[in-house]
Image (tube, rainbow, N blue to C red):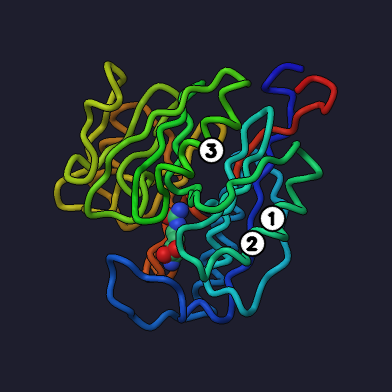
Amino acid sequence: MDENQRMRLTLTRPVSPSIARCELTHLGRAPIDLARAEAQHAAYEQALRSLGCHVVRVAGAADLPDAVFVEDTAVVLDEVAVITRPGAASRRPEIGPVAEALARYRELRWIVEPGTLEGGDVLCAGRTLFVGRSSRSNDAGIRQLSDHVSPFGYTVVPVSVRDCLHLKSAVTLAAPDTFLLQPAWVARGWFGAAAVIDVDPQETFAANALLAGDGVIYPAAFPRTRERLEAHGVRVLTVDVSELAKAEGAVTCCSLVFQEVDPGSA
Ligand code: CIR
């Protein structure tokens, strides 16, 4: 089936009422306004719909503070979904309901002990998966991911990152052939001859954009980098994610975007 005829799905999960107890690695704790976070999340889902995504919500989890950051629980490719084993132990109970939801769309594979992997460390560009070696994703997890996906023709490239939570804090795709990158956190050499847009030096956390369809969802907090994206012809939909950012989340982490696949064709 033609890619354009397939439904684009996105899995999301509600903001947990316990989000104030979220994991934090590089940020200090700041009060999070739950009602505002929920409203921001609803606007984010609406932005996904406006880019042609059908939003599938996984049930909320009141006792799992970081459940909204569903990206970290799986890596979804056309052929298979790999359920992760988050490096943050508090996040491991998040995976069950996500796996259950994804089983409707994909065959599942699993990262197991001693591997750890979080989806925020996995950047899929065509048939290459760049994977951050971070405090959340270890070499055993990266090897297991490679074993799961290489039969389908994917190459896994481990990437060193520094001073940030995940690889996708430091680099994401702004277009299928264009990276948006924070050069302080990841070296652009990993990405070969591909086009690279650097974030504006005044906007430290600006490298996380969510590519969905023909546009990106992007935080309103980074207008200078937004200008750079638009100057490269990228269609940008801005969302205010200020409350989720206090939990060290950004725009990719609140969804898993994938194409519906005819089970007979995968
Ligand atoms: C955590 O530290 O695990 C959460 N507070 C934030 C996770 C953000 N995830 C992501 O960017 N992929």
Local SS, label 3: helix
Query: Is 167 positioned to the left or the right of 151 in the image?
Result: left
Residue 154 in the image: state x and y as whole percent: 53, 22
Crowd rating for badge 1 (residues with CA inside 10 Å; few <14, some 14–19, many 20+): many
- In which quadrant will I find the N terminus? top right
| In contact (CB < 8 Å): disc 2 and disc 3 | no
Is residue 231 visible from the viewing direction of this image?
yes
* Residue type at numbered disc 3: Gln
Q: Secondary structure at mark 2?
A: loop
Residue tagged 2: 13
Ligand 1, by image quadrant, is bottom left
Asked which quadrant contains residue 163, the reply is: bottom left
Residue receiving disc 3? 144
Ligand 1 has an atom within 8 Å of the beta carbon of the residue at disc 3: no
CA gap, disc 2 and disc 3 = 26 Å
Looking at the image, which residue is at 23% across and 46% down? 224
CA distance for labels 1 and 2? 9 Å
Front-lying residue, 233 or 72: 72
Where is residue 250 shown, x and y percent of the image? 42, 56
Vertical comparison of 33 with 7: above or below? below
Q: Residues within 10 Å of mark 2 (few under 14, many from 20)?
A: many
Q: Nearer the viewer, mark 1 or mark 2?
A: 1
194 on left or right of 33: left
SS at mark 1?
A: helix
- Percent x, y for residue 232? 31, 27
Residue at 50% across, 75% down: 36
Marks 3/1: CA–CA distance: 19 Å
Give the residue at x 14% y 47%. 201
Q: Earlier in the sequence, mark 1 or mark 2?
A: 2
Q: Position of residue 86 (x, y in %)?
A: 51, 57
The image's mark for residue 98 is 1
